Image (tube, rainbow, N blue to C red):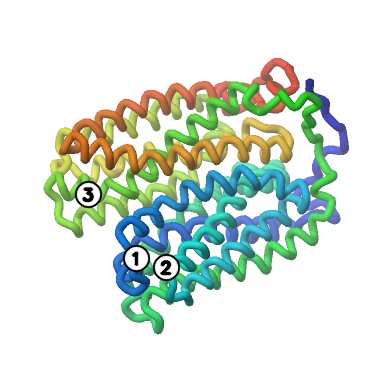
Amino acid sequence: MIRTTASPPPASPSSPGRVPWWLVVSAVVLVAVNLRPGASSIGPVLAELQRDLDLSATVAGALTALPGLTFAVAGACAVALSRRTGIGGAIACGLALVAAGLLGRSLVTSAPVFLALSVLALIGMGIGNILVPAFVKRHGGERTAALNSVYTTGLAVGATLPLLAAGPLTEHGPGGWRSALGLWGLAAVAAFGLWVVVAARDRREAAAGTRVLLRDPRTRITRSRTAVALALYFGIQSMHAYVQFGWIAQIYRDGGLDQTQAGLMTALLAAMGIPGGLLMPAVVARSQHLRTWVVVLGACMSAGYVGLLLAPSGLPWLWALLLGVGCFSFPTALALIVARSRDAHVTAQLSGFTQPVGYLLAAAGPFAVGALHELTGGWTVPLVALAASGVILIGAGLVAAAPRFVDDELAGRPGTDHPGAR
């Protein structure tokens, strides 16, 4: 059974004693741009790391797989941490780990220590991944969709900046690849300082709102079909994202493009995350045809893979654009975590269930595609499988986008219609 503890409604962002709106926005911007560089900054300098730290190919491969696995494990612990420290305090702790890990690994000369510090930083990022949506839910008020757009766009910017800066920093920076990696540790220090202030200003956070409490330990969030569908939706889109960053450039090169052209197509795909982050939270909050959007995004994903299969060098920019639009499913999934829950504590629980599942699939996807490629000696079977998974993405998205709240499903109440759920 489930009971709820009633308390006054959450205050608006401008209420006395609460975090001011300008500080909320600043905090979300800074944390968003710090939740991806620790992972995306590795790829451009991987060759230099292998040379200077004597990394084997196996260890280098493990390094590229660490984000998905670590995000999944850390995410599963984030909600428990937030119960002790509050949401803002837990995010600040996560940023402290990010700063320590990224700064530390830019100074070491030992491969095992480098890996350990990378894991430390990724744990901090995983905590932020889970809890920032709950912070957005708690402080967004009527501007939740706008704040969600700030967050998801910041994630895209944070993933893209290291790709652009790695070359110049490695070539001209005082420490080579160490400058390219250490810079993001300094950025995390700045974010940590601001979040300490946020956590201190938000002392009533843990006590506010209506918290869903489980009397029966057998009552779990998996009893919500919306939560299960959203976990699958987030997982499938995460798998596509990691597969694309890991393999799309090689697929283009095997299809006839040179290295520069393949890199440009990958960059075009990645850059689509910025308009997606700006657009989709507003669509989720306001569109009367959200499930139509879900179908269109999944269809674009599948069409992009079919194009790569049939004519990879014919219209390469079109396939990259289609896959990029399909990846609008990522900000859609993050926005649905907020939109399909009423209370910030339920948002945290939903995020803590949805994202670890997603990142486990994200870690498995690139390995599975690589294995299929090696087993079959080509890209036909992997691309057909990826295109087919777009159908699963659509099916899960249709359920997740239905007009229901996870809070109601956990409490055994009928679903409640609301804008953007049709």
Q: Nearer the viewer, residue 409 or 121?
A: 121
Among numbered discs 2 and 3, the one appearing first in the sequence = 2
One can see residue 143 in this view:
no
Residue 44 location, quadrant: bottom left
Residue 190 location, quadrant: bottom right
Left-right relation of 38 to 408: left
Residue under label 3 = 250
Q: What residue type is disc 1 on?
A: Leu
Residue under label 1 = 55
Quadrant that contains the C terminus = top right
Left-right relation of 75 to 379: right
- Checking the image for residue 111, the label placed there is 2
One can see residue 274 in this view:
yes
Q: Position of residue 63 (x, y in %)?
A: 40, 57
Q: Position of residue 345 (x, y in %)?
A: 73, 39
Contact, CB < 8 Å: mark 2 with mark 1?
yes
Q: Position of residue 37 (x, y in %)?
A: 47, 61
Q: What residue type is disc 3 on?
A: Gln
Q: Is residue 170 above or below residue 97?
A: below
* Rendered residue at 44%/37% (across/down): 361
